Amino acid sequence: MKSAHIAPFFAVLKAANPQPVSELEYTNVFELLAAVLLSAQATDVGVNKATRRLFAAANSPAAMVALGLPAITDHIKSIGLFRNKAKNLLATSELLLERHGGQVPRSREALEALPGVGRKTANVVLNVAFGEPTMAVDTHVFRVANRTGLGPGKNPLEVELKLLQRVPADYLADAHHWLILHGRYVCVARTPLCAQCAVAQHCDSAPRRERATQG
């Protein structure tokens, strides 16, 4: 994607969704952290279904520790990798109490030191909870960034750094939400909906697909 196309690309996405939000359900920063931790290799719909029950029983680190591993595991057993995620959620809750007074830290280093919290999860929490201009690269963002030419890279970190370099500052705070939603509903993995795409004119690959179809 040429640099001249980047601002118009995001302007279109912003016009369609001026205030994008995460599709994960949460009411406080700890719930957000827990939901993102549980969302690895799982859908937001599936995570929300499980966390409605979980957060009704425990929505703070202290309450989660009091709930205990067997109950946590039972609440999230519909989510993939639930046993390991339950252990990480409990261990993270314990560390939040031991090291951070039960509060979710707002530094990347402290977040990534929590069990089950990697760079992507830390980026989501820093962005959504604390307003930091971070770029969380999940499978959708990785696909859209490479397919459109906006931020090509061989791995999530390369894509993240390229996007941070290329996305205009005015759009950076909400950029990862727009890219996730675009990848989830329009620029889907197998058959992207190029004919319905509002930003196809700015995309490196959509014109090639159209020519191939016409040919």
Image (spheres, rainbow, N blue to C red):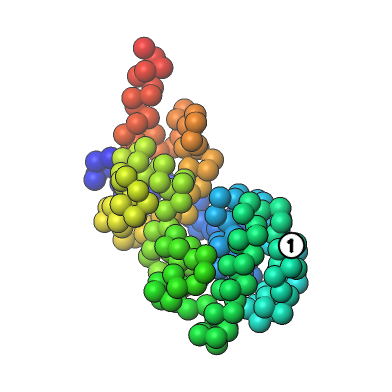
Q: Position of residue 96 (x, y in %)?
A: 55, 80
Name the residue type under label 1.
His
Q: Position of residue 3 (x, y in %)?
A: 24, 45
Dividing the image into 4 quarters, which one contains the C terminus?
top left
Q: Nearer the viewer, residue 140 or 176?
A: 140
Badge 1 density bin: few <14, some 14–19, many ≥20, Cα 10 Å: many
- Residue 66 in view (yes/no): yes
In this view, 116 is above or below 143: below
In this view, 182 is above or below 205: below
Q: Nearer the viewer, residue 207 or 29?
A: 29
Picture quarter containing residue 168?
bottom left
Q: Residue at x 43, y 76 (%)?
A: 110
Picture quarter containing residue 132?
bottom left
From the viewer's perspective, tell me whether residue 43 is left or right of residue 134: right
Number of marks in the rendered image? 1
Picture quarter containing residue 199?
top left
Dividing the image into 4 quarters, which one contains the N terminus?
top left
Q: Residue at x 48, y 78 (%)?
A: 105
- Residue 54 in view (yes/no): no
User: Secondary structure under badge 1?
Assistant: helix
Disc 1 target residue:
75
In this view, 114 is above or below 82: below
Q: Position of residue 114 (x, y in %)?
A: 49, 72
